[in-house]
Structures are given as C-alpha cells and as structure tokens.
Image: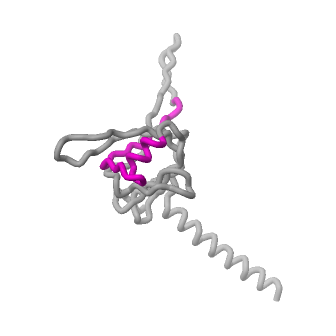
Amino acid sequence: MSTSLLVVKDGTLKLGPVATQLSVECQISRMEIVAAPDPKEFTSVCGKTTVPGVTGWTLNLEGAQDWSTDGISTFLFEQDGTLVDFELVPSAALQPTATGKVWVSPGSFGGVAGEISTFSVSLGLDGKPTITPATVVAAAGVQAAEDDDVDDELELESVG
C-alpha cells in the first residue's frame, strides 16, 4: 500500500461566492481545517459511558495583513458575520481538496513596529467540510472512461 503524504505548498485558498471567489493563498502562511470532537458522558448506576457528540470544525488562517481592496484583511473585515464558500487546496500536486462554508470573522489591524503585520483567525464552519481526494477522483474518471469504451465495444459487437 502506497502512502501519499500531504505537504502544504503551492496550494490555493479561495473565499466567497464561487463565481467571484477571492484567491488569498499568497497572503496566507497557515491554512488548516481543525476538528473539535465533543464527547458526551452519561453516568448511571451501572457506570460511566462516553459517546461521540457532534464534531465542530474550524478553518484556521494565519497570514500577512493585506488591507488593499482585494486583500484578505479587507475581505474578512467587510464580510464579518456572513457565511461564505471556501475552497482549500493545500498543494498543487494530486492532493485532497476541502470545500464548505465558513462564518467570517475579521483579523487584527496593526502590529509590532518595524515588522510585517500579521493576523490569526479561526473561522467556524457551517457543518462538516467536504474533503475530496484528488487521486481518487482522477482514478474514478479514468475507470469511467474505460467502462464507456467497453460498453461501446459491446454495443458495436452486438450490432454486427
């Protein structure tokens, strides 16, 4: 069994409606989706039981503040409190892609004298993200094409 390790490099991060998404990957140094399990405990006369609760999800971002009209800081500030689409592709290589919806919160304004001003935010996801392994999608597409060719050959043979 082969292993495909995820390295965040040359990826993309897009925020906003699909038709007008803002690409912000060049302003981001950290982009990750984090799960927050919420186990529930119940204690009865017979003992304690722990069951899984509903897992919460966040999109954690860190980066350089960019307050230009198409900058990440301006976008987060102007979209504060709104639900927007996101697409996170950690690597240009055949790696998983994550999509979903996040609640926007603004980041910091200003910073340390003489240093590049940065921000750090945790954006809450609306539900569970969709994570699609690119290699599986590509393999499924090839298989579907091969299956179509087989069907065509069978149809041709049955006609003749």
Q: Nearer the viewer, residue 94 or 63?
A: 63
Q: Residue at x 72, y 82 (%)?
A: 153
Q: Quadrant of residue 13?
A: bottom left
Question: As displayed, is residue 29 above or below residue 138?
Answer: above
Q: Position of residue 10 (x, y in %)?
A: 36, 62
Direction front: furthest residue: 69
Q: Is residue 152 visible?
A: yes
Q: Position of residue 25 (x, y in %)?
A: 38, 56
Direction bottom: furthest residue: 160
Q: Is residue 57 visible?
A: no
Direction right: furthest residue: 159
Q: Nearer the viewer, residue 91 or 134?
A: 91
Q: Residue at x 56, y 55 (%)?
A: 18
Tell me how the rendering is colored.
one colour
Q: What number of labels is visible?
A: 0
Question: As displayed, is residue 95 above or below residue 79?
Answer: below
Q: Quadrant of residue 8?
A: bottom left
Q: Is residue 1 left or right of residue 111?
A: right
Question: As displayed, is residue 141 above or below residue 83?
Answer: below
Q: Nearer the viewer, residue 1 or 33?
A: 33
Q: Residue at x 41, y 52 (%)?
A: 69
In the image, residue 64 lies in the stretch drawn in magenta: yes
Q: Is residue 160 left or right of residue 3?
A: right
Specify start and end residues of the magenta stretch as a single range: 53-79
Q: Position of residue 109 (x, y in %)?
A: 31, 40
Q: Position of residue 53 (x, y in %)?
A: 52, 29
Q: Which quadrant, please, contains the N terminus? A: bottom left
In the image, residue 28 lies in the stretch drawn in magenta: no
Q: Which quadrant, please, contains the C terminus? A: bottom right
